[in-house]
Image (spheres, rainbow, N blue to C red):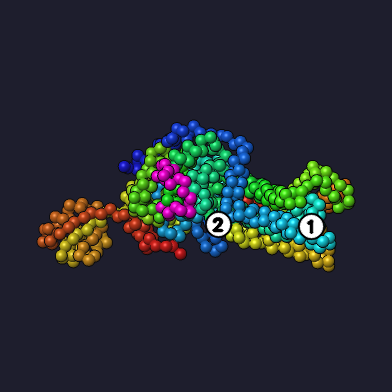
Amino acid sequence: MTEALSNSTVSQELSEEPSDVAVGDFAVATHGLTKRFHQQVAVDNVDLLVPRGAVYGFLGPNGSGKTTTIRMLLGLIRPTSGRHRLLGQAMPDHAGDVLPLVGSLVEGPAFHPYLSARANLARLDSVDRHADPRTTKVRVDSALDRVGLLAAADKRYRAYSLGMRQRLAIAATLLAPRELLVLDEPTNGLDPQGTREVRHLIGSLADDGATVLVSSHLLSEVEQVCTHVGVMHVGRLLTQGPIAQVRAVSELRARVQTDRPEDAARVLRELGLTDVAVESGWAVGTLGKIAAEKVVAALVNDGVPVAGFAVERPSLEDLFVSLTGEGFNVSG
Amino acid sequence: MSAADLTSERTPGLSNEVITASIDRARRHISTRFLRSELRLIFGRRRNQAGLGILAVVPVIIAIAVKVSTPRPGRGPDFFASITSNGLFVALAALTLEMGLFLPLAVGTIAGDSVAGEANIGTLRYLLTVPVHRTRLLAVKFAAITIFSLVATLWVSLVGAVAGLAFFGGGEMTLLSGTQIGMGQAVLRVLMATVYLALCFASLGAIGLFISTLTEQPIGATISVVILNVLSFILDSIPQLSWLHEWLPTHWWMSFGDVLRDPIAWGDMTRGLLTAAGYALVFWLAAWARFSSKDVTS
């Protein structure tokens, strides 16, 4: 199963170097991107491909190399080897042309503590040579409004809570129209309501036509809004592609609740289910090509009482575990 | 929604018409917005305002002290003895006293903050992704340091001149060479001395800018600048190192008094300005060499 999920199967057509014709179709395209810090390889030969218009969930546990990859994408750090394009243009050579079209949130919010939210955004706008000073006020206020901070716009940043700071950082990415948004852990520090709002915001940005690359170590948070996913683990991109395609590789599991789980497990095995196991009152097995309704019939036929029955599509987290053979924990 | 709906069919569109109309991606005009924003940050910060306040205390103390007890000739630093004859000398006396620590510390604080301060709070990464070209960042930061140096030094002179004129009056000024010049000429000469020193301090600021690119701790960079400044004064006072003296960044600072000769003795001040320009250029380039390829991980 792990074999079937390997990078080569899921995204074969994506993992090759895009041809010149295809280059423009990708908002982000990296080729062999690698970063070594002293002896440690932080990012190892990553071929990230984000199609234009996608909401790409860039997933992986803390320390898996997501932020380092994002810093390389934006030209903050230099790759040890490899190259990449943003919006079809080679980086970092064309940073001056490309980055104005890219809104980014990297490793949490950072602002001048003694300035108000409004003054902080005006500061960022004032260093942008493409921004029109006559419309700064309008754009700052509309960005603040979009993240729900307009009422607190004149408060000093130091008085902001973590959630408000995170919102302000997102507002900063909205100061100008963007074709690509790179959001590194945008829901960090937000309450459930704030998390929902950010998800909604990402959706509305995508509806406007922007490509969104959103990284997260919380799989379930991102799963719902993404059209594409890429999974990082200890510096490597394990798999990427449209979310349905990535998940299609994982197989459905049947789950039977019964007071005779051992008998149920025997029936499942006889039916041809694989990876059959007994877990605290449940018998579980991978369906493969066997129809789910057959399972219940067979159980009842055999006189095994069925208290509950479920067919599960593994979550991204389960998928991650099956890809790495380990949990979604911090990588060393 | 299926994956097929979400492939690259969408064309990038823009949500807000006001925003769209106001952004012209093609324009790249010369603008002073970044520099003005820097100056607002520097002069809007309370710590720096307090620093300027402290700088202003020294000339006021000098004026009061001299008023209360007139110094006898031969005692106290240069210019003190002349204060009672013309209040403008308070400005020059204040500059002499603040040259050793206060003014270099003030410029060192701004310079140390320039890059390390932004790195420390993380705003550096957001400036660079706006994007701000790294060379432009260093150019604007150094311009802001130079302007701050001019403002701080002129501020000390201004407070000194106002306090001095209030306490001792103005009128004709007797130069070091004995000749007398009118009030207008005297003000001009004090102004020249002030600008000369401000440019000298700005070259120290270039050293600070360089150190600021090496660290994420602005205080560390500031302390380094002050240490280098004091070290330069110490080396300058060791006679056995006389071969080194003329190359020290602080060596020509005291030459600002040459504006009070008749005619003005330009020789040493020219050397001083060349030395300052040399230090500024070398350390700005060092900062550029360091920063332009640096990994920004803050």
Disc number placed over residue B80 in the picture, else none: 1
- Residue B175 pos. (x, y %): 85, 50
Q: Chain of mark 1?
A: B
- Give the image quarter of residue A50: top left
Q: Is residue A41 above or below residue A135?
A: below
Given the image, on which type of amino acid does mark 2 rest?
Answer: Asn
Q: Can the viewer see residue B81 in this picture?
A: yes
The stretch of residues the image draws in magenta is A144-163
Q: What residue is rendered at 48% in x and 54% in y?
A: A158
Circle 1 residues within 10 Å: few <14, some 14–19, many ≥20: many
Q: Mark 1 against mark 2, which lies toward the viewer?
A: 1
Can residue A148 be found in the magenta stretch? yes
- The label on residue B120 is 2
In the displayed structure, does residue A81 sit left or right of residue A234?
A: right
- Looking at the rendered structure, the kind of residue marked 1 is Phe
Q: Is residue B96 left or right of residue A310?
A: right
Residue A144: % across, % down? 44, 43
Label placed on residue A6: none
Q: Is residue A155 magenta?
A: yes
Taking depth in this image into account, of B211 and A19 the one nearest to the observer is B211
Q: How many marks?
A: 2
* Residue appearing at x 61%, y 36% in the figure: B29
Of the pair B106 and A265, the residue shown nearer to us = B106
B154 left or right of A247 in image = right
Residue, far front: B68
Give neighbour class at mark 2: few <14, some 14-19, many 20+ (Cα, 10 Å). Answer: some
Mark 2 secondary-structure assignment: helix
Cα distance between the residues tagged 1 and 2 = 43 Å
Front residue (pair B170, A127): B170
Residue B246 in the figure: left or right of residue A23: right
